[in-house]
Image (cartoon, rainbow, N blue to C red):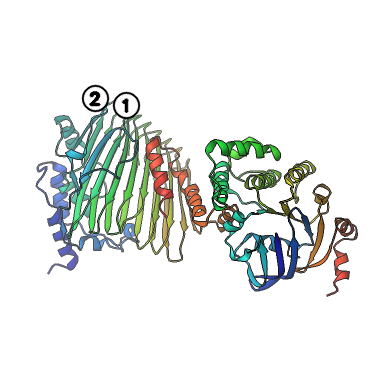
Amino acid sequence: MASTIDQHKASFLEALQTSAAEGSSARTQAREALETLEVPTRKWEDWKYTQVRDLLKASYTTSGLAVESTEGFLIPDLEGDVLVFVNGRFSPALSTFGSNGDNMHIAPMGHLSELLSGVVDTHLGELISDSNIFTATNTAYADQGVVIFVPNGKIAEHPIQIIHINHPGAEALASQHRNLFVVGKHAVAKVAETYFSIGEGTSFRNQVDELIVLDNGELEYVKIENESDQASIMGHTYGHLGRDSKIRMFTLTFSGELVRNNLHLKLAGENVNAQLNGVYLIDGSQHVDNYTKVDHAEPHCYSNELYKGIITGSATGVFSGYIHVWPDAQKTNAFQSNRNILLSDNANMYTKPQLEIYADDVKCSHGATTGRIDEGAIFYLRARGIPELEAQKMMIHAFTMETVESLSMEPVLAYIEEKITGRF
Amino acid sequence: MLSINNLHASVEGKEILKGLSLEIKPGEVHAIMGPNGSGKSTLASVLAGKEDYEITDGEVLFHGKDLLDLAPEERAGEGLFLAFQYPVEIPGVSMTNFLRTAVNSVREYRGQEVLSGGDFLKLMREKQAIVELDANLTKRSVNEGFSGGEKKRAEIFQMAMLEPTLSILDETDSGLDIDALRIVSEAVNKLRSPERSWLVITHYQRLLDHIVPDFVHVLYKGKIVKSGGKELALELEEKGYDWLKELNPA
């Protein structure tokens, strides 16, 4: 007899099944793999602090309520393409794209040109080295998402804004999303992706991104997760970085019932420069887990990871940072830091740095701190007439803004700044 | 203006102030001297509203209001300013942003119009000149990496910006070289007016050569044991704090 968890898995897969994109070998393989892949439990080291079993429990539908406009969802003053997905489906009416002309090929899945179909056939699923039930479900069935291809030597000046709005109705909504970005040699792209869930309903997103940056290419990729207390995210982002390439990633999580952001970057050529920063500001009973892995496979690469959290209520934050320096990766510079402020007695933070170094000429460091807000500083500000709440906002702003200093999209920076100071 | 009556305050169950009384009128400068551990800094902290202290008895009226009932920011709004003995470094908060927020918070409290960006910068330049503060310091984070003297001058600069009616200088002279001491004292003297009062807490008589007090009080074991004019500071300097033991045999 099948166990309860197997039944949940079966009904979860059934809900998310689509007939789209039959025939691709990656999809066929993923469908086969799903038969044996198990749901992670807390006994698995990588899932120790995050219970995902309950995500499969709900009986999901893939349709939700309508969203008529992008008002309140757009990043103000960010000019460029806007691609909007409502309840996981591309919304042509709310989207406009093509501002980069020939410098970027971009289309939602399902609307791909021959060239972009070729990109998908070549690369989809390529980077998923540690397939699990969520990534396999995504590869097997996700037929929505954005494909970006910047040809060699092209600079896509205009940023791409991808907006996901989930609006569940009475039934729990499940949506899947798959992004594939290929940034060619010497090419440049900038993407800001925002997630929202609105209304009182329950929702679950299963998201996979694959980012390929070829030699000397450059990608800036910002994710902002703005979810309701009934919304969960399972996100997997994989990056493959070629020689002399640069990536700047920033992940901001405001909320969500359960959020797991997996980020796995492979520095696959010499002299890669990777920055992966993040901020989470959570309260209530929210649970946010950032699981990151940086693979230094080649020499002379630099990675810098800085995640900061503010946790209040009885919320739980988790950070795992794994740095793996391969034997050939001499002259690696790899830094990692996770700093947290707990604003309440019941807030929790689990942080786990992990370094595995097999080369002997490297500079690596990691550090983690979890503490209270600096009461001495708060008193100093208040003694100058600044009200307590305002003083706290100033301190949170000061604590977190260091993580976004390197971002180049000014309107995104301003948006993040406003969101962060308005959070508590 | 400030009326302290039989103030008792403890920290972690240990009584530090043991029935302190003091009356400050508009325009007066009062100096409080005393040996280490006599309660000088506790008095400053209690008046500014630091939460680590428990008030067990007594009252403090400031402009007729119950000061101890007000939050620290309300005390600042009412016109109280504390120049910290150890100013706090706040990385990531720029001095300019901090001061603009502070000045406008206080102005809002006082029912005054909030300053525009231009007016604020003008005010800042004007007050910076009073303390001869390097303009670059205001671009940095609050007190971060400031030298000891710069920190103390920055405190006096903040005082000039916030225009308090009662300023408490908590050992502002400690650790200052003679030039910095002169700058700080001259700034205070320039700001003196019939409406503004000072409570100058110091360990050394030297500051009082520059900021001449109307009254000098000697704090010892949590109480004011002797009060007098400015000559009392000289007497104290000459006889040393051991003299207090003779005045107050245990």
Whether residue A132 appears in this view of the structure is no
Badge 2: how crowded within 10 Å, few (<14), some, or many (20+)?
few
Give the residue pinned by disc 2.
A102
Which residue is depicted at the point 43% across and 66% down? A346
Which amino acid, by three-letter code, is at mark 1? Ile
Whole-percent x and y of residue A327?
40, 42
Q: Are marks 1 and 2 on the same chain?
A: yes
Local secondary structure at mark 1: loop
**Mark 2 — on which chain does it sit?**
A
Of the pair A28 and A167, the residue shown nearer to us: A167
Whether residue B7 appears in this view of the structure is yes
Which residue is depicted at the point 42% across and 44% down? A417
Image quarter for residue A172?
bottom left
Whole-percent x and y of residue A258?
30, 58
Whole-percent x and y of residue A53?
25, 63
Of the pair A377 and A246, the residue shown nearer to us: A377
Give the residue pinned by disc 1.
A155
In screen coordinates, is A360 left or right of A222?
Answer: right
Are the two marked residues, 1 and 2, in contact with CB atoms closer than 8 angstroms? no
